[in-house]
Structures are given as C-alpha cells and as structure tokens.
Image: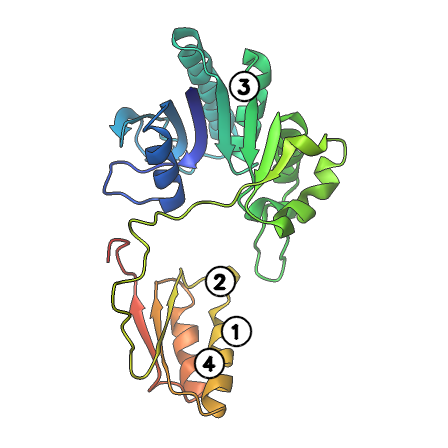
Amino acid sequence: MKIGIVVPGFSAHEGDWCIPALLDLGRWLARENDVRILALRYPYQPGEYAVHGARVMALGGAARQRLGSALLWRRAFATLSSMHRREPFDVLHAFWATEAGFIAALAGRRLGVPAVISLAGGELARLPDIGYGDQLRRAQRLKIGLALRTATMVTAGSRYLLDRARPWLRSRAADTVHRAPLGVDLNRFQPGSMPVQADPPALIHAASLVPVKDQATLLRAAKILRERGQRFTLEVAGGGPLEPELRRLTQALDLTNMVRFHGAVPHHD
C-alpha cells in the first residue's frame, strides 16, 4: 500500500526518538508498504529525508501561529496533492485530531482517498486548573470536530478515549470507529532471562515534570507506601518546570531518602 502519514512532528533521523510510538509505526509500516510522512512542525527546518525506509517531508512549521499556521496548512495541502499526483495514496493517516487530523481529513476528501484519524488524548481534554487540553480553545474544538466528522475512520487507543469521543461520533457507523492501541516494540521492551530483584524494590517514573503528569499524586502515594512499611526507592526520570516544587514536596513528605530525581535522561538510556 501507499500510505501517507500526517503528524505534528517526526524524527529528524533514526537516532532521534521524537515521538517513539510514531517512529516505530513508520518503521514497521515501511517494511511492507510505501510510507510517506508529512511532518508539519518538527523538525523545525524544512527538508526531505528517509527514516527506516519511510520518506519524510518536513515542512518546518515550528511554532508559527495565526497567519503563519494558515500558510503552513496551505503548503501541507499543496504538498499532499503533489505527492498524490506523482504516486497516488491508498490511504491517509493522521495522528492527533487537531491540526494534523483536519488536514488529513480535508485532503482525503479532496483527493478521494480514505482518511484515518487516530486520537492521541489531549484533543478531548479540558483541564482549566492546569491549562491543559485542546477543548479549552475554540479554534482547536472546531478543528477536532471537523476532523472527526470528515474522516473515513477514527481510532483511539482505549475504550475510555472512544467514550470521550462519542459526542463527535454519534452520526458515524459503528464499523468506522475502532479501538487500536499503540504497539510496543518487543525487541526493545522484554524481560531479561533472569529477572533482577532490586533490594529495596525500585519504582521508576519517566515523564516530563509538568502539571498534566501529576507527579505530586505519585509522591503522596509513595508516602502512603512508606507509612505501610513498604521498602522501596522511587527513581524519577525527566525534567521540567515543576522540578523545584516537586523537590520541596518530597522534602515536606519526608521522602528525600527514598526519591531520587535524575533530570532529563536521553531516550536510549
């Protein structure tokens, strides 16, 4: 098949994990398909290159807004049309139902190509207390609604996410909505031949230190474990603006001898 994938960002090279699930998706699909990836925002410089057999067209949209975004969308439509004229797509697939989704859905309708939109989560979230979620902004809500109504098929990684999407999917036939979890590379993530028993057991948390990840709740849960007599260490991998606040909370909860902050850690490590 000839598959066009539209994403906000994609790996600049094979060693750049960027969004690891999308890198793995492109790599696996390219084994048996002609995969062309349109990266809207990242890498920040425009260019064409190959990653694991997939051809990538980076538009270098970076953080452009308003008129800059409109010009980016225009270029995206023109690029997809040009690609399709040279080698017609069998299907377009977008991750995130926001910018990437509405571009793929409209391009698919214009080109007569089926368009699959995969929800990634934040599109349907509205958490005003931490300023998170695309439902907080009217422009994003419009793009999401258009993408979900226009797409040929909609997927999400969990039943919960599909349930959150029901208001936009009521008019769709059941066979056009599917649960499709992101896969895991079993060559990278598998148990060793002899499990290592840490003493004390190590809990590992890997994520940016930002409000939506809510490490504060994790730390309070760690306090409960300690109060129940459980021995453990909590290894926190990741950096972010909340690190000073979380370090203070760790001290206030008397967990400094059990919690270690490692800062940003390269993906391969």
Quadrant hosting residue 134: top right
Three-letter code for the amino acid on which mark 2 is drawn = Lys
Three-letter code for the amino acid on which mark 1 is drawn = Thr
Badge nearest the viewer, 3 or 4: 4
Calculate the distance from the C-alpha at mark 1 to the C-alpha at mark 2. Answer: 9 Å
- Residue under the image location 34 percent in, 50 percent down: 186
* Element carrying mark 4: helix
Three-letter code for the amino acid on which mark 3 is drawn = Ala
Q: Tell which residue pokes out farthest to the front in this image.
A: 193
Calculate the distance from the C-alpha at mark 1 to the C-alpha at mark 4. Answer: 9 Å
**How far across and down, in percent of the image, does residue 266 sit?**
26, 56
Q: Which mark, residue 107?
A: 3
**How far across and down, in percent of the image, does residue 119 sit?**
56, 41
Three-letter code for the amino acid on which mark 4 is drawn = Ala
Quick one: quadrant of the N terminus? top left
Q: Are marks 2 and 4 in contact (CB under 8 Å)?
A: no
Q: Mark 1 — residue?
A: 217
Q: Earlier in the sequence, mark 3 or mark 4?
A: 3
* Element carrying mark 2: helix
Q: Earlier in the sequence, mark 1 or mark 4?
A: 1
Q: Mark 4 — residue?
A: 222
Q: Are marks 2 and 3 in contact (CB under 8 Å)?
A: no
Front residue (pair 137, 143): 143
Quadrant hosting residue 76: top left
Q: Earlier in the sequence, mark 2 or mark 3?
A: 3
* Element carrying mark 1: helix
Calculate the distance from the C-alpha at mark 2 to the C-alpha at mark 4. Answer: 15 Å
- Against 61, is 210 above or below? below
Q: Mark 2 — residue?
A: 213
